[in-house]
Image (cartoon, rainbow, N blue to C red):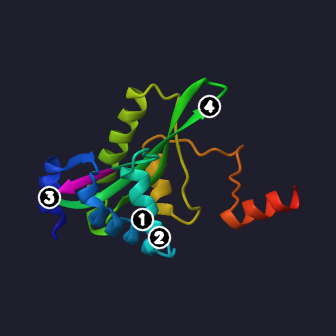
Amino acid sequence: MQSSKVTKDIKKIKIRKAQEDDIESLFSLIDALADYEKLQRPDLKARERLRNDLFGALPKISAWLSELDGKAVAYAITLFTYSSFLALPNLYLEDIFVLPEYRSLGIGKELFKHCAKIALKEGCGRMEWQVLDWNKLAIDFYKQIGAKQLKEWLPYRFTKNEIEKFIQLNS
């Protein structure tokens, strides 16, 4: 697809909340992100959990799709956390991804702006996300839009197995 044609059509981009019948399009985009980040794609059980966390009785996350001519070309997954010091919710951006052939066209920026508007609408004190240290394209994008890299906070993580081991060793 020629970028000049896509650029002309950028005004036709539609951003909307994903519905349950969008799940295969969403899985396809998540798979593309996994491939890009050289990670394992979600297995069938993970896909079922994701479906339930998006569309079950008590949704835990929201997904947003960017469509161009009816094709999902980008997505974002968001959830709310909370700051006790601000006494306000935070919007956490778990994923934001644009298919490679649609990058540098403003689609990611529009999707990011959509998420920022949600944060404001919901009274959030912050919007936060993480980026892999090797992802120069994303880092450059975040710098370009004025985001600040946190230097004083270091991310830590427990996997499910590590959580279980921690509890077992400390019981």
Q: Which badge, 3 or 1, comes first in the chain's sequence?
A: 1
Disc marking residue 70: 3
Front disc: 4 or 1 = 1
Q: Which residue corresponds to mark 1? A: 48
The residues tagged by marks 3 and 4 sit, at their Cα atoms, a distance apart of: 37 Å
Q: Which badge, 3 or 4, comes first in the chain's sequence?
A: 3
Residue 120 picture location, percent across and down: 41, 28
Q: Residue at point 21% right, 55% down?
A: 67
The residues tagged by marks 4 and 2 sit, at their Cα atoms, a distance apart of: 32 Å
Left-right relation of 65 to 34: left
Mark 1 is surrounded, within 10 Å at the Cα level, by few (under 14), some (14 to 19) or many (20 or more) other residues, namely few
Q: Nearer the viewer, residue 123 or 54?
A: 54
Disc marking residue 118: none
Q: Is residue 28 above or below residue 157?
A: below
* Kind of element beneath mark 1: helix
The magenta segment is 64-70
Front disc: 3 or 2 = 2
Q: Which residue corresponds to mark 2? A: 45
Mark 2 is surrounded, within 10 Å at the Cα level, by few (under 14), some (14 to 19) or many (20 or more) other residues, namely few
Q: Amino acid at mark 4?
A: Ser
- Dots 1, 2 in contact, CB < 8 A: yes
Q: Which residue corresponds to mark 4? A: 83
Q: Nearer the viewer, residue 87 or 152?
A: 87
The residue sitting at the front extreme is 57
Q: Which badge, 3 or 2, comes first in the chain's sequence?
A: 2
